[in-house]
Structures are given as C-alpha cells and as structure tokens.
Amino acid sequence: MSLRSYFSLHQRTSPRGSLGIATASAASATAAVIEKDTGGALRLKALESFDGDAALKALSGWQRRTGWRRCRTHLLLDDAQYQLLPVDAPDVPDAELSDALRWRVKDLIDFPAEAASIASVLVPAAHESIRARQAWVVVAHRNTVAERMRGARDAQIELDSIDIPELALRNLALLPAPDSSCALLHVGLHRSTLLMVWKGDLCSMRRFDLTASDLLDATPEEFEALVERFAQDVQRSADAFERHFHAAALGRLWVLDEQAGLPMADALARHLTLQVKPMKLADWIGIDTTRPLMDARARVDFLPAIGAALRAAP
C-alpha cells in the first residue's frame, strides 16, 4: 500500500473539494478546504480552527453550516500516534510487501507487530542500476487508528483517509517542484520538519526541536545563533541526500514563509550552499480567505491541514 493511499477508507461520489484536518490533541483541530476552479486551478476556499474538548464535533458543525460536508476528507494522525521508519525494502512481490515490512520493523516498535497498521512507500532507487531500495514505513497501533476513526464517526465526520503530517508537507513541496528534486522546510508550532523530495516521493526526512516560537521569542543575537546551528544540520542533511541519491541534485530549499516576522529563508541563505527560496503558497494556489496561514502567537498553523487537503482535490 502506498502512502498516498495510506489508510484510505472510501471516496464519496460527486465530492465538493477536499478537506484536510490536522489535530495536535483531542482539544485542538485545524481545517482547510481546497477546490479546483473551472479552469482547473487550485483555490484555498476556507480555513478554520477549533479548540475545546469537542473540537471535532465543533468542526462537524462548521461543515454542516458552511456546506463542506461533501468534501473528500483527510485526517492527519498526531505526532505521537505513529512512527515513520526508514528500512531496506525486501525483494518480494507487491502483494506481499506489507506483511514483509511488518516483520522487518517488529524490533523497532514497542508493541506486537500483529497489532500494527502498516503503510509504506518505496523510495526511488538512487541509481537505475541499483536493485536494492529503501522504503518509508508508517506504523501505528491498530487501536490508535480505530480510535481516530471512531472519534470522527462520533462527530459525524465522514473520512476518506487517514494520513500523516510528513506526507501532507510533501504535497506542499510538489506545488513548485512536481518532478524535480527539492527540499522543503517547515518551522512549525511543535517542531521543524525538513523533507527531501524526488520524483514526487518523500526520500528523506528529519525532525528538529526548533519551533517558530523559539525564533520569534529570541533576541537578534539568539536568533542568529539558533539559525547558524540549525543551518549546519540542514546542510548536513542535504549533503547526505546528494551523496546517496546521485542523480537527484537538490535544486533548492523552499522555506515555508507564512509566519509574519520570521525571515527564515534570508537567515538560512547566509549559512547554506543550497539555493534558498521563501515559499508563499499564494504563488501556486489561489487564496480566498483573509486568515493568516500560520500564526504562532495564536498557536494556529494551517499548513499541515492545507497539505492534507491537497491529497485529492477534485
């Protein structure tokens, strides 16, 4: 099973757009709706955030009031609910891959392999002559997935799939570079995520403890020191990617640039050999909402939800 169809549930008929839902906890959720206009261009139609013990029920009520219930709906797992593991892909038929990977990761998880829900994607081979390949394996406890589905059902939210934040961010990286290789950096509310994408697939990923609030709260001197240390890790990750994927020279590092007052692209460019560019989603998606796409002070980040909605915008 590919990560694009990870935990897919169903596809509703005649959908109206695509709805992405990201949850940081049971008491917090963000939602984003994307549609295609008559010319086929993507448009971000709506953003909303929900807080409180019944965040998903509040979201469901918003869907009913605004008419977004007909959207294909994609829910992201929380960070603590899954593991994303790089493993060597066994040389087995596609139909046997999931079971083979289950036993390959059994010593890397803290619950029985039989209780795991498994999804995977094969990473492109570093060179055409190389047969051995790697895979990213998403592992979640079966009870965790069932609980997320039950929570959505109790809130009367029809899900088409359950996905993960890294794949949602990968969807954002494909907007400027659908075929070429590139890196994408998201400095979020709880961590920073660096992705390397090639041929449309997630090839490499690193998480960092650095958050948007850390940088916004820093003095100019502290900011520069944080960025310099962070840039060293980013450069090492990029160098490792290019050593492994010989045919995939990174074109550039896109830095998601939606947080006001956080000039990360310019700051990183002073320390990296990569070409660094700020990424404004408005350059690739029509935006029909006035809400900021990210506001760390208000503890709202819509970018993962937007990436989830990009999974299958009809």
Image (cartoon, grey):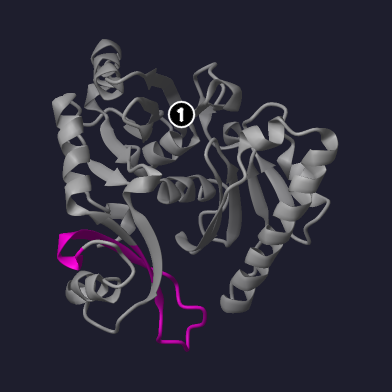
At label 1, counting other C-alpha atoms closer than 10 Å, the crowd grade (few under 14, some 14-19, many 20 or more) is: many
Against 157, residue 120 (above or below) is below
What is the span of residues highlighted in magenta in the rendered image?
Answer: 112-137
SS of the residue at dot 1?
strand
Instruction: Give the farthest residue toward the top.
Output: 65
Against 194, residue 95 (above or below) is below
Residue on which the image places disc 1: 43
Residue 153, quarter of picture:
top left
* Residue 160 visible, this angle: yes
Where is residue 3 drawn, in percent x and y? 32, 57
Where is residue 228 drawn, in percent x and y? 78, 52
Question: Is 16 one of the magenta-colored residues?
Answer: no
Where is residue 25 drawn, in percent x and y? 36, 33
Where is residue 191 drawn, in percent x and y? 55, 44
Q: Is residue 263 left or right of residue 293?
A: right
Against 174, residue 86 (above or below) is below
